[in-house]
Amino acid sequence: MKLSAFAAFAFTLSLLPGCASDKPTTPDWITGDSARFNSAQYLIGRGQASTQEEAKDRARADVAKIFQVAVVANSEDLQRSKSGPTGTPQYEQQASRSISTRTDQIIRGIQIAELWQDPATKSYYALAVLPRLQAAASLRQQISQLDEATADYIEQSRQHSDLFLKIAAASQAVKSEQEHESLQKSLQIVDPTGRGTASKWNSAKLQSDLDELLKRVRIAPQVIADSTPGLEEVLAGALANAGFMIETGQHPDFVLQARMELTDLGLEKGWYWQRGVLEISLSETATGRVRGTRRWTVKSSATDRESAAKRAMNQVDAILKKELRAAIIDMANSH
């Protein structure tokens, strides 16, 4: 079979090196939008590195950053919504941990859709994608579960006759609503409509209800003799910060007893060290029954003994302001 002159010429050209058809094409997503994975249907992340795996990790992190921004924004909203010293950082932290866990579930759905190596620089480029509908469906399911939990906690708080059980349930309602608000921000980003799922409850009202319940608990702070000087003031300040009513009369509902003795560990490598164990216990005034005990280890150092002791007390102050409310509620409900 004979080839025509034109066909023979075209065949010869196809065999020549450096032909335009052999030149590698840079993917569209390297410098712009992806035609295959459009932003209306996918959340997109890009990564560049000297190795494939690092490029993939950076691309996944680029998508995950979208959710991290939403979590940070919700945390800032919580900080701004606090009124006075009776805010609840411990429940904020619990909510943040739960939010991070829930967000991780979404992030696990991120896929590496394309990988390309620049023939000139040898750098690897990765494109990570997360389908919007898939992420939105998961977020809506989690929000629905949180709403059911919040409704249940609110009902428990209303039904319980025990004040501390009411407080515990109200605390969980606040935590669930905080998680809802954070996931709502993520959903608004993922949802093509930008609407998300509106909350059934007002978080500020839930927090206000919790604060009112806390004020109904009258607690007398008490420091064991021979404890480190300054503990009494620190304990009273943390108790007020936690939102409980400090009782100075003869008939408190509970007595919160604290003890701490610092041990001077001496000089080591130019630093004076102090160590102690902070212990608190909650007891009922009417029965004398101890509802629970909590302990924390404190250790500090400074270039002089006085500063080391002061730093130890600063640690105690920080611990109690951060954890006292949750500790009291847990102790009260442990028996």
Image: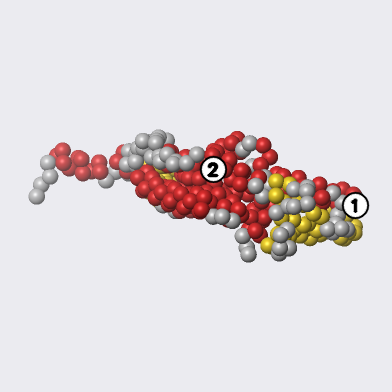
Depth-wise, is mark 2 or mark 1 nearer the camera? 2
- Give the Cα separation between the discs numbered 2 and 1: 46 Å
Q: Mark 2 points at which residue?
A: 206
Quick check: 121 left or right of 231? left
Quick check: 316 left or right of 39? right
Name the image quarter holding residue 200.
top left
Q: Name the residue under label 1.
A: 305
Number of on-image labels? 2
Regarding mark 1 in the picture, which secondary structure is present there? helix
Amino acid on which disc 1 is placed: Arg
Identify the residue at horizontal 57%, vertical 50% (top origin).
Answer: 171
Quadrant including the C terminus: bottom right
Name the image quarter holding residue 240.
top right
> Considering only vertical position in the picture, is 99 above or below 33?
below
Q: Which of 294 and 163 is in front in this view?
A: 163
Tell me residue 115's x, y (percent). Answer: 40, 48
Q: Can residue 157 be seen in this view?
A: yes
Callout 2 crowding tier (Cα within 10 Å): few <14, some 14–19, many ≥20: some
